[in-house]
Image (cartoon, rainbow, N blue to C red):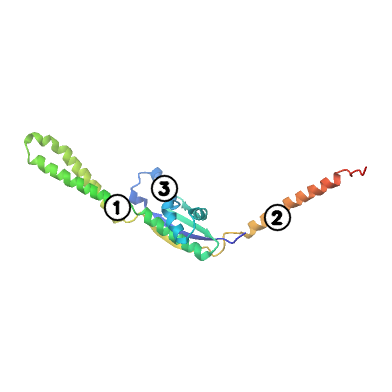
Amino acid sequence: MPVQYAAHAQVVYALTREQPTGFLREDRNMSTQLVLLESRAVLDPVAAEWQVSVDELTPALSADVLSESEIIDIRFVDSDRDRAVEVLSWVVQEYLAVANADARSDVQNYLDAELFAILDRIEAVRSGAPSGQDQLAPLVEREQWLRTQLDELRMTDLVGPGASTLVQPYVDPTPVSPRPMVATSAGGAIGGVLAVFLLAILARRMTRPPRSDT
C-alpha cells in the first residue's frame, strides 16, 4: 500500500455578509460552498497548473463544514508531502477567487442608473401640472427602495470578501495511510480467509473416495 499524506487548510465563509434569515439558509449557503470547492470552476485551473486531470484531483480532495460554524475544513491527500501542501494551496487560492468574484459592481451600476432615472422623473412631476402629482408617491417609494439597496450593497463592500483563509495549508506529520493497525488487521483477515480456503481444499481431497484403476 502506497504511503499517503494529508494536507489541511481552513477557510471561513462569512454568512453575515449574506444576511442569513435562518438555519436553513445558512445550511444551503455552506452546502453551496462545498459544491463550489469541488467544481470545475475551481479545479480546472489547478489541474492545468499541475498537468493532471480533474478526475485525478477529485478523489484526493474533500471538504467539510465544522459543526455549526462558518469554517470549512479542506483536505488533500497525496503520496508526496510537499506536493500535497502545494496543490491544496492552489485549490484554496482558486476557491477564494471564485467565491469572492460576484457581480456587485454590475448590480451597483444598474441601481445607480435606475436611481438617476427615478430622480429625473420625480423632478419632472414636481415641476409639471398639478394633475400629475398622483404619480409622485410611487416614484418616491421607488427612490427609497433603490437607496436602501445601494446602502446594503455598500455595507457588504465594507464587510469585505465572503471567503477568506483561516488556517494556511499544512501537512500532517504522519501518513494517513497505510495505518499500522489497519494493515495488521487486514493482513490477519486475509490470512484467515486463505487458511479456511486451504483447509476446505484439503478436507475435500481427504474425503474424496479413491479413484478406481479399472
The quadrant of the rendering that contains the C terminus is: top right
Q: Residues within 10 Å of mark 3 (few under 14, many from 20)?
A: few
Q: Position of residue 167 (x, y in %)?
A: 43, 61
Q: Which mark is residue 156?
A: 1
Q: Position of residue 161 (x, y in %)?
A: 34, 56
Q: CA distance from mark 2 to mark 1?
A: 58 Å
Q: Position of residue 29 (x, y in %)?
A: 39, 47
Amino acid at the residue labelled 2: Gly
Q: Secondary structure at mark 3?
A: helix
Q: Up-down: is 159 above or below 111? A: below
Residue at 38% in and 56% down:
96
The quadrant of the rendering that contains the N terminus is: bottom right
Amino acid at the residue labelled 1: Thr
Q: Residues within 10 Å of mark 2 (few under 14, many from 20)?
A: few
Residue 68 can be seen in this image: no
> In this rendering, which labeled residue sits more in front, label 3 or label 1?
3
Mark 2 and mark 1 lie on one chain; the one further toward the N terminus is 1
Q: CA distance from mark 3 to mark 1?
A: 19 Å
Query: Contact (CB < 8 A) between labels 3 and 2?
Result: no
Q: Is residue 154 left or right of residue 65?
A: left
Q: Which mark is residue 188?
A: 2
**What residue would you read off at disc 3?**
32
Q: Residues within 10 Å of mark 1 (few under 14, many from 20)?
A: some
Residue at 17% in and 44% down:
117
Residue 154 can be seen in this image: yes
Mark 3 and mark 2 lie on one chain; the one further toward the N terminus is 3
Q: Secondary structure at mark 2?
A: helix
Amino acid at the residue labelled 3: Thr
